[in-house]
Image (cartoon, coloured by chain):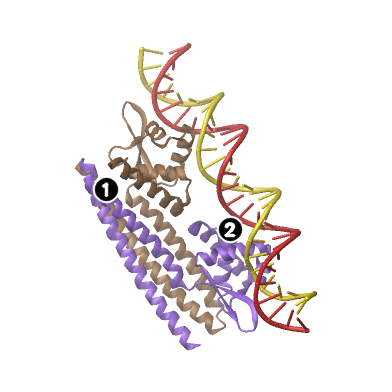
Chain colours: A brown, B purple, C red, D yellow
DNA sequence: CGTTTAGTTCGGTAATTAACGAACCTAGAG
DNA sequence: CTCTAGGTTCGTTAATTACCGAACTAAACG
């Protein structure tokens, strides 16, 4: 059955996001559902309450969490009070990784500064070299992310026009 | 004062690892301390109890957690019962990212399979294309990681010989 | 104006987590 | 065999988290 496969996928997403983003189980399931299921036209609050078998308050709280994290967004339709929730475009979700990478680069700069000042033994020289190599790696990772993000933004913009 | 700078660095590491790896605060501080401070010859259990101002049991539990996660390792010295703890080499720590990336690649393959079967509307075709592009990105990320890991392993091996 | 729809906020509770001290274990020294 | 150094394990506790239902709000409808 196809329905089962979908459910399994959502569940896999659930576990994945839960530990990757460190968010509550319900938030993780909602995000999974929106990615797999809500890609067409978005899901409403009520549809989510139904699908998730959770209370209105829990859905509300977790939707707001995901909104604040920019993992999801919503749009409205004229003459319709409902909010339609969708998973954020990939470019947005990758942006979060970018922040992480930038954070790590900041940290590594601090370490390098520290190690440059306090290099007394040969072991510490090695550490310094390692830090340089690590910084190089992170800079490449940053570059890769930036490239991919602009690529996605391009795709997303084109799709916007096609509508 | 240098001591203060070190403390601040460790604290920054603390916050960073806490959310990056989703580990308890104390584990995160221990890891930070071992990276900054324990790079020369490793720190013993007792030194950590002292430095962290935490109980033996807490140190034990968190050290074992970090060992299981392969964030740290220890070595022993002949005729000395103590364990000397050190942060794992960067190649090892990067391996953890690799696992994450591989997990994500697995997930994305599942999604692609699902989407290929259930492409009914044009919006879903776009999703499929996005998934392909995302997979490409993750494959590049994997490649970057693999390259860096071998590079680090090389450096680490050379240092082993120089001793 | 009252009612309905769509969602938020608040207070409480059950479950989980992070840390603790005390008791325990185990290998080697004397 | 007993003692000690170097940890580990166990049971408890305090704090945090995830979720709930009930009460609330705000906008639109009639």
Q: Is residue A5 left or right of residue B120?
A: right
Q: Which mark is residue B114?
A: 1
Work out which quarter of the rendered image holds the N terminus of chain A and state it.
top left
Name the chain under label 1: B
Q: What element carries label 2?
A: helix
Q: In this view, does A125 lie above or below A6?
A: below
| In this rendering, the label closer to the viewer, 2 or 1 | 1
Q: Are marks 2 and 1 in contact (CB under 8 Å)?
A: no
Q: Do labels 2 and 1 share a chain?
A: yes
Task: Please tell me how crowded label 1 is: few (under 14), some (14-19), or many (20+) other residues with Cα within 10 Å.
Answer: some
Q: In this view, does A105 lie to the left or right of B147?
A: right
Q: Residue B25 carries which label?
A: 2
Residue A157 visible at all: no
- Camera-nearest residue between B13 and B158: B158
Q: Is mark 1 on a helix, strand or loop?
A: helix
Q: Residue at x 46, y 45 (%)?
A: A25
2 or 1: tag closer to the N-terminus:
2
From the top left corner, tell me how far across and down residue D28 is, in percent: 37, 21
Name the chain under label 2: B
């Amino acid at each position: 059955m196809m329905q089962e496969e979908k459910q399994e996928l959502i569940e896999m997403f659930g576990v994945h996001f839960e530990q990757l983003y460190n968010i509550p189980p319900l938030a993780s399931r909602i995000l999974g559902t929106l990615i797999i299921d809500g890609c067409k036209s978005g899901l409403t609050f009520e549809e989510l309450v139904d699908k998730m078998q959770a209370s209105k308050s829990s859905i509300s709280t977790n939707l707001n969490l995901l909104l604040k994290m920019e993992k999801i967004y919503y749009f409205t339709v004229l003459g319709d009070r409902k909010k339609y929730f969708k998973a954020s475009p990939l470019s947005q979700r990758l942006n979060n990784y970018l922040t992480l990478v930038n954070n790590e680069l900041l940290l590594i700069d601090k370490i390098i500064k520290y190690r440059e000042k306090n290099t007394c033994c040969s072991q510490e020289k090695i550490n310094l070299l390692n830090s340089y190599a690590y910084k190089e790696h992170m800079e490449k990772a940053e570059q890769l992310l930036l490239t991919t993000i602009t690529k996605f933004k391009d795709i997303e913009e084109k799709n916007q026009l096609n509508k």
